Image (spheres, coloured by chain):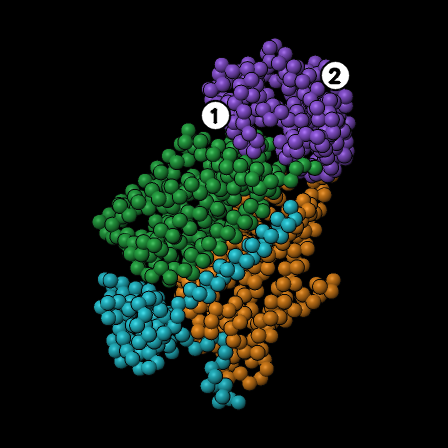
Chain colours: A cyan, B green, C purple, D orange
Amino acid sequence: MKPKIIIGSLVVVAFLIFGSYSFMQSNVEYTDIAGAMAKHKKVQLKGSWNKEKHASFDARSAQFTFWLVDDSGKECKVVLDGAAPNNFELATSVVAKGRFTDEGYFHATEVLTKCPSKYEAQPSELKKTS
Amino acid sequence: MSAARPSFRLFLRSTGAVFLKDLRSELRTRYAVSALIMFVVTTISIILFSLGSEGASPDALSGMLWVVVFFAAMSGLSRTFVMEEERGTTLTLQLLAPPGAVFFGKLLFNLVLVTGVNAVTVVLYSAFINGFVIRTMSIFVVTVLLGSIGFAAAATVIAAIIARANTRGTLYPVLSFPIVLPLLLSVIDATRMASEGAFFGEAAGEFQLLISYIVVVIVSSAMLFEYIWKD
Amino acid sequence: MNPGLRIAGKDLRKEFDRRPVFRDVSFSASAGETLLVTGRNGSGKSTLVKIICGVLSPGGGTLTVTQDQDGPVREARNLFGLVSPYLQLFDEFSAVENLSIAMGIRGLPFDPAAADGLLERVAIYPRRHDPVRTYSSGMKQRAKYAFALIHTPPVLVLDEPMSNLDGDGTAVVRAVMAEQRRRGILVVATNDMSDIETYDGRIDLNERR
Amino acid sequence: MVLKILLGVLLTAVIVSGFGLPMSPHPQAWYELPVIPGLEEKARIIFFHVPTAWLSVVAFLTSMTYAIQYLRKRDLAYDIRSSAAAGLGFMFCILATITGAVWAKFNWGSYWNWDPRETSIFVLLLIYGAYFSLRSAVETEEKRATLSSAYSIIAAVTVPFFIFIMPRIMTGLHPGAKGDPEGAGPVVEFKMAPNMRVIFFTSLIAFTLLFYWMFTLRVRTAELETYNQRRG
């Protein structure tokens, strides 16, 4: 009776940990445009929005299109299923999750925006005052 | 009580006998199977009517497949325990079988039932719903298989709980939903990957999660079952 | 047979909803003895019967079952046979199937000849292949005796043994009781003293509230 | 008594400082809270929203621990504790949902976004709801205690899977969610000005004490009720 409970609990804990690894593993890897083109799988493309090129939302296909520049300066077209993400204009950088299509654009299922950290005073302002 | 140490072989025999008893009873009455299949046919035709000529996105379609599976499972999988309680044979089983054998026997029966019904569901769904395309078959097959086991595992223990309560019908979906939800989200995600044409390796995380869900639910249910089963 | 066999309860007690059903129930019986359980409705006869059979855990106290050292060792649940009004057979199956299912789940080998013998004895042999659902209540009660005896239990527990039975049926049950008394322990829970001829120990639950 | 005084002092301090301290874009004195762009005065709700969410989780774990104790010892006193904790947890869970929805409305534009954290609090609500509907559906006290204990344990072992699966299928708006560049840590790991952090953690401690106090009160009333029932 007792050992059964102990062994059972250990198995439950072990598999909870095993399950939690799936969470870390599934973090799709970050890469730049060249890396994303080379790998034919789902990646997280890191870069920023090229504000000089037009970004538009096509209401018919419900897709949002914009141009992304990565850290090496390379540029590509990103088509996102859905509307522009929150705070897209304010974002300092964006991460697009998806894969390169054969037509030569990056097809994103999700775009995350990175905004300035939220619960601190602006660092620049802190410098001014101190 | 001083008694013989339960031997593992005897335990397996009891488990098998409980499973066979349920299987033969089901083959004779066809109660659960007919309800399940009718449910699947009804929901799929409702989806067909509501979609009309318009298609839906592959994402939505892969989600809807599992909605059909979820509600079908909810309508049929509680039968194994509720039936014993309604006909007053719970005591009979308590006299005959060790609790573990009842649990694993019923789990096995639910597993066979849900796997069979899911196979029918998937075939009907792919045949009738146009926009539903699977690009990576391997991911899809493994997902349906693991999903079925997960559903059977969660459904069995919840059924054991509600069978002992007074109002059963409404309680079953209420209790199951929060337990089954992580499984549901995970299989929907994996099915989406399969329809997107992802590589098998990309879904490894999902499978790992599904396997650990199955093990965690089965092991903890097996430990708790004795308390639920005995008055 | 079964010379070492003994069951003993010590200070057994049970509550439902914090209300005591009974308390301080102690008894013991060895092979060849009959234990009688009496008490008015609601005094917990069936509860005690379920505790003795091991399907209900007592709220306190201990129940000990000692097996015969010479015979084959059995699992605890296979030591008991129960006949009671609230015990139901699997009614979509026939009597024979019920017996084979019972032996299968108990993990014991099923002997069709022994089953047929038993069914003949309780006089439902001609209808042994009909589903139990089609039986009359008296026939169901007879089938329960076959169900309780198929594994020749060292302890036979009868709750309201004569319910639904006609004259022939009571005669069969008296023979079963006499045989069990020779073979092992007999526990009878009833208020009808005409059900039982002799007993060795008695638990009156009216005094144990 | 000491507990009640301490609790009163701490909660008063949190309420006064949380609502009363001035906000300044360039905090100089120790008492000036920084103005957070995009949040401004709305940031104050964090001192009350996060503790309620924290308590609903603490209550859930407390309830589960007593559920295990009940199954081991079969003593209805543990069931009283388990259900008392669950009741409080349900209340705090509703409070967390409401304060969260209000905050979300003013910050993200809508009351509900199905962000991972919102989804998990929703699931917790569902579990609490299921737990109480199960309890109301069982008449015998012992059976009710056993079944609801078993259910809360089964629910507790499946809850972690939400934490594993959620971030993968949804984008987070909450700080600490995967969408945040700082990573996927728990809520309290985000960066915060030191004086805000003091109020924040004081509030967490005060609310935990509040929970403990309410919990003992509920257990005592429940025990008195059953005592009365048994006599009456």
Residue ID at (64%, 46%): A1
Q: Which mark is residue C198?
A: 2
In front: C172, or D226? C172
Q: Is residue B154 above or below residue B87?
A: below
Other-residue count near label 1 (Cα within 10 Å), few / some / many at <14 / 14–19 / ≥20: many
Chain letter for mark 2, please: C
Q: Is residue A19 above or below residue A35?
A: above
Q: Position of residue A5 (x, y in %)?
A: 62, 50
Q: Position of residue D19 (x, y in %)?
A: 56, 71
In front: C169, or B51? C169
The count of marks equals 2
Q: Which residue is mark 1?
A: C93
Q: Callout 1: helix, strand or loop?
A: loop
Residue ID at (47%, 44%): B155
Q: Callout 2: helix, strand or loop?
A: loop
- Which corner quadrant holds the N terminus of chain D? bottom right
| Amino acid type at mark 2 | Thr
Chain letter for mark 1, please: C
Left or right, B132 with respect to C9, comes to left
